[in-house]
Amino acid sequence: MKNKTILLGAAAVLAASCAMMGGREDASAAKAVAMMKASFKENGQAKLDRLDQDETQKLCSIHATDKEIPKDVAARIEKANLEAIKYPPGNKYMGDWKAGERIAQSGVGKQFSDNPTTPAGGNCYACHQLSKAELSYGTIGPSLYNFGKLRGNTPEMQKYAYGKIYNSQAFTACSNMPRFGHQQILTEKQVQDLVALLMDPESPINK
Amino acid sequence: MRAKRVAIAALGAALCAPIVLGQTAADEIEKYRQALQDGNPAELWEARGEDLWKQKRGPKNASLERCDLGLGAGVVKGAYTVLPKYFADSGKVEDLESRLVTCMVTLQGFTPEQAKKDPFGGPGKKVPMDALVAYVTGASRGMKMSVAANHPKEQEAYEVGQKIFYFRGGPHDFSCATCHGADNQRIRLQDLPNLTKTADAQRAYTSWPAYRVSQGEVRSFQWRLYDCFRQQRFPELEFTSDASVALTMFLAKNANGGVFDAPSIKR
């Protein structure tokens, strides 16, 4: 009986300390948000509302140090983002791969030092290998060399590529890749041009 | 036979071309960095900073020689290795730049606005802050980082700094961790330190401030954070703001044990 009481007591202490840790975690998260809002100032196009997280950003920040995002959270994020994708009318996913290559090379856009009237780039090469000719590519994302050639230039794959560029988190919760269409970084036409860069048999990526 | 071997070697070279070229580029960049080490212009900032430290300035016509940077009034040697730190006189956790601002206000009589007016140099504009930062950090060269983070306010700054590190926001959903949370990654050809791992965090943190060849300026750690957030597409990080100090606390403590080796020189 006494043993049981001690055990229960220990369990209660453990539960309480866990709750406290949780509380402390939440408190420092709330403190971080408040502190950031007081520590930044708007500059050009970069207003303070950029610190207002949407649900996806909030969840991905909370779970950033988890080994794996809880399955139910990941499913919630992917569902909400998938539902938010706006596909182009007439299922026209492909644009001009040459324009796509220029967009993939360009890193301008959305910084407070950028001219807001200049169209933004996708900066794909910052993180991905694409064409073999460009040796200066990053490795945060996987190589996309031969993307279309390996997968086949089918309407289904074109639609997937469009959706992935438009909103990467519809397919991989908390992906590092920006949601280019969803966040209005790139226009519908620009996303179509990037799909062509990935899928068009004439694109250097598929050579 | 020989021709065959040459042909096989050539084929091997062709197959490995991207790797070989990538490796060569990295080697060449490393050679370039090595070459830069001879004669770092940051020494000019350090010398100018030492003069400014000792010079009587401001409404109170006083020098900074009585400034307590964390190891007692007037101690410059090794002070950078213990920053950021909680200071009882200001009641705040301060990094080097914010501590210099505090001393410029309390000892020299500047207003906080005056002390923070020119945080970073630019073309044709050399500012006292960069020079003072170069001088103070240079006096910790060769010493081990040892940020205590024992005081509750220091612990809080560390915890909040960690949250800021993982905070995803802005149009690109970027956080610091997007680029600095995994091993062996690059943006284009630029290697990225994983700031959540001790060895990388030590190597990165102990190499700032740095003379940037491409900019012709000594860049402070405050500048490093300011420019990271610009590229993160966030609004502008305010100089010596609480968030900047908290994030610095997180990064500096993660670098504990690393041998400080700056002002360095970078591309």
Image (cartoon, rainbow, N blue to C red):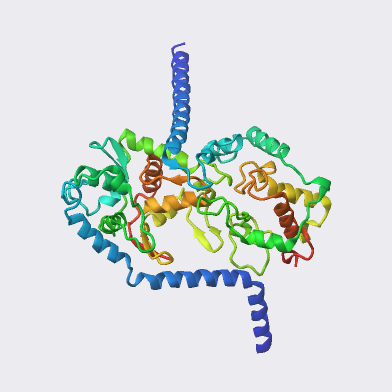
Kindly give the residue lying farthest to the bottom in the view shown. Answer: B2
Q: Which of B86 and B19 lies nearest the eye of the viewer?
A: B86
Tally of marks: 0
- On the image, the x and y values in percent for residue B26 come to 51, 68
Q: Which of A185 and B9 lies nearest the eye of the viewer?
A: A185
Res B83 seen here: no
Q: Is residue B12 above or below residue A52?
A: below
Which residue lies at the image location 45% right of the left edge and 42% below the top edge?
A41
The answer to which quarter of the image holds residue A9 is top left
Q: Is residue B91 left or right of residue A112?
A: left
- On the image, the x and y values in percent for residue B110 come to 24, 45
Q: Is residue B186 above or below residue B98?
A: below
Q: Is residue B260 left or right of residue B197?
A: left
Which residue lies at the image location 67% right of the left edge and 33% below the top edge?
A76
Image quadrant for the N terminus of chain B? bottom right
Q: Is residue B204 above or below residue B155?
A: below
Res B129 seen here: yes
The answer to which quarter of the image holds residue B169 is top right
Which residue lies at the image location 26% right of the left edge and 43% below the top edge?
B111
Q: Is residue A136 left or right of residue A97?
A: left
Image quadrant for the C terminus of chain B? bottom left
- On the image, the x and y values in percent for residue B260 come to 32, 57
Which residue lies at the image location 20% right of the left edge and 49% below the top edge?
B58
Kindly give the residue lying farthest to the front in the view shown. Answer: A117
